[in-house]
Image: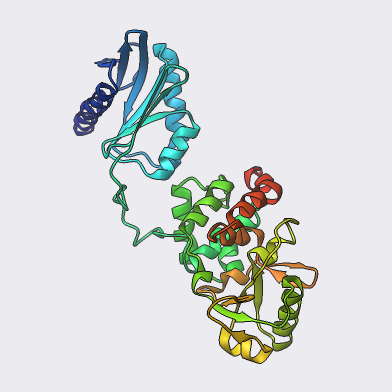
Amino acid sequence: MVNEMRERELLDAGCRRLGDTLREGGGFELVQLAARRSKAAAIWVISSLTGEVRVVVEAKTAIWPRDVERVAAQLRAYVAEEGADRCLIVAPALTQRTRELLRRCDIDYLDLRGEVRVAIPGRLLVLAGGEKKRSPDGRSYSRNRIANPFRGKASRVVRALLAEPARWWGVIELAERVDVSAGLAVKTLKSLEDEAYVRRNEDRQVSLSDGEALLRRWADAARNPFRDAARFTSSIRDPDELTAELCKGLERLGVAYAITRLAAARFVEPYAAASVVDAYIDDDPDRLAAALGYLPVERGESLRLVAPPDAGVFQFTERRSGITMVNPVQLYVDLKRAGGREPDVAERLIERRLREGLTSRSEP
């Protein structure tokens, strides 16, 4: 009874919100009806001088990314039973990821923070933005999931999943591979599973379910570590020659490293010529530069060195022409967070190298 009352309150509030939005556009009227043939919560009729649109509406006190496919299938069945045009979810709040998946399933939505999307192709499009809140779901992240799986050691789990997108991982196997605790792996995977980025098989192994979306989300959440990089110059002006010399010097000193950004992109994107060499190093940049004969500068640099906040960038690296470069998924993130033409190179990297592997789904 309590849930029914709450859903009725949601429907009434949502109807008022959409009605107000339609009236602002002018020429539309919204009527709320009871469903006749299905178990849908309501039917909303949007009418104008040119006709009407019937929308099956379902009220949800909560809907998370992992619920979207199931709810979408249910709503499509209601649309068929009612002879309606569209279907719509009303909820108190929807996360960005939930809205993204609803749009993919061609399901409209309205949350009481103000986010509205109703789209009838060729007839009607209603879009309204809402209030921005950092944590609309109100869930606690302290016990069983990670608030931000793209920072610190948790990002190692994300990198592994993206680096081997067709693989099914056991949790302990994955934790050992990227050198994190089993508890951190469990919490990180729970966060990714809740957001419908990964799936499980009957043996509880995990694999990617939406790789490209996960990679783009990581790039959006990541910081640009090269913004505060140590900057140096060299007598060698050609970036390719400088890259080769730097790598030989670091290997001679026994220092772990990984070339990234345009200096690495040239190996997978032939038109991505670099003017500056960017590298992650597992040591103090100033000490290493002094040992290798590079001079510190404030601007006009030919070399940028960064000791990364987490050593995960040195995992899943690739060896090309005697040079160790970051994994292509890490390369995409680094390029995307840079300025100038590097985000364009990142998009070409997605199209030519990464997309096919990230979007294909392996069998359980």
State the quadrant of the N terminus: top left
Q: Is residue 171 visible?
A: no
Q: Identify the residue shown where x is 71% and y is 80%.
A: 246
Residue 126 lies in quadrant:
top left
Which quadrant is home to the C terminus?
top right
| Nearer to us in this view, 121 or 89 | 121
On the rendered structure, is 331 left or right of 46? right
Residue 358, x across and y down, in percent: 63, 48
What is the tally of numbered marks visible in this picture? 0
Percent across and percent down for residue 362 are 66, 44
Left or right: residue 278 versus residue 39 is: right
Measuring 69% from the left and 86% from the top, which residue is drawn there?
Answer: 254
Where in the figure is residue 302, as x and y percent of width and height? 64, 75
Residue 345 in which image quadrant: bottom right
Question: For the view shown, which residue lies furthest in the front direction?
Answer: 300
Q: Which residue is drawn at 65% across and 86% down?
A: 294
Q: Is residue 284 above or below residue 91?
A: below
347 versus 280 height, above or below? above
For residue 352, say whether it is visible: yes
Q: In which quarter of the image is residue 27?
A: top left
Q: Farthest residue in the right direction?
A: 321
At 33% from the left and 23% from the top, the residue drawn is 57
Q: Colour scheme in the image? A: rainbow
In front of the other: 76 or 230: 230
Query: Is 186 drawn above or below residue 285 in the view shown?
Result: above
Residue 315 position, x and y percent, is 63, 69
